[in-house]
Image (cartoon, helix red, strand yellow):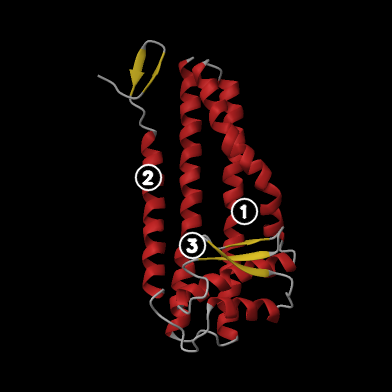
Amino acid sequence: MYYGYGYGMGYHFDWTIILVLIGALVSGIASINVNRTYSKYSRVGNYRGLTSNQVAEHILHAAGIYDVRIERVRGNLTDHYSPKEKVLRLSDAVYGRTSVAAIGVAAHECGHAIQHQEDYAPLRMRSASVPLASIGSWVSWPVIVIGLLIGSTPIAQVGIFLFTFVVLFQLITLPVEFDASARALRILEQDRILEGEEHRGATKVLKAAAMTYVAALFTTIMQLLRLVLLVNGRSRDD
């Protein structure tokens, strides 16, 4: 007896689901690691007693940036910098906190603001690729499913092509995130905001956060590989 997807008269075990499960496992491990690491260093305060807001303001002003607002946003680790609005948003777990973890995250978001000011090429590329990534995310799956249901390999391949936009967006995201963390850690050390164990703690937090982006890319690549195998398998069956 076979389980999985069916084409024509029979049913076949879809072994490619293993690729999705591997991706989900890697993503889950990365998520657990970043939450555990952040939780650990959120209980470690900086010796100068500075808040994340103060550190963010210092970094921005030191870089000659005075037109970026710092706001509070709801959620946990929902911190982000909005280039269009020129707003640096810090989550409830970061805003106003004095922990090493909070300062590391705030400094990372400042890194994005500095990238924007310097017209950092990968950041510009990521911003430009957002519309294509959105189209790929929303349209690719319906197109692929329709192609498989009506037995049209070319239509399914169009869906796969659209899905590659999502992969490319996540690939471009990696250098943007790694560079922002590198900038943050360098500034925190040079300005002696965090030193010794405190700086090492912030480094661990930002590295753990960066690995979630690596895991997301890996998971998406596994999904893409699965789609290619499914569509190619259907093509051979036809």
Which residue in the structure is indicated by mark 3? 77
Disc 2 element = helix
Disc 3 element = loop
Q: Identify the mark nearer the N-term, 1 or 2.
A: 2
Label 2 crowd (10 A; few <14 / some 14-19 / many >=20): some
Which residue in the structure is indicated by mark 1? 172
In the rendered image, residue 9, in percent from the top left (x then y), is placed at: 37, 10
Q: Residue at x 30, y 23 (%)?
A: 3
Q: Identify the mark nearer the N-term, 3 or 2.
A: 2
In the rendered image, residue 225, in percent from the top left (x then y), is placed at: 48, 37
- Which dot, 3 or 2, sits closer to the camera? 3
Q: Identify the mark nearer the N-term, 3 or 1.
A: 3
Quadrant hosting residue 63: bottom right
In the rendered image, residue 139, in percent from the top left (x then y), is placed at: 59, 32
Kind of residue at disc 3: Leu
Quadrant hosting residue 189: bottom right
In the rendered image, residue 159, in percent from the top left (x then y), is placed at: 58, 30
Mark carried by residue 234? none
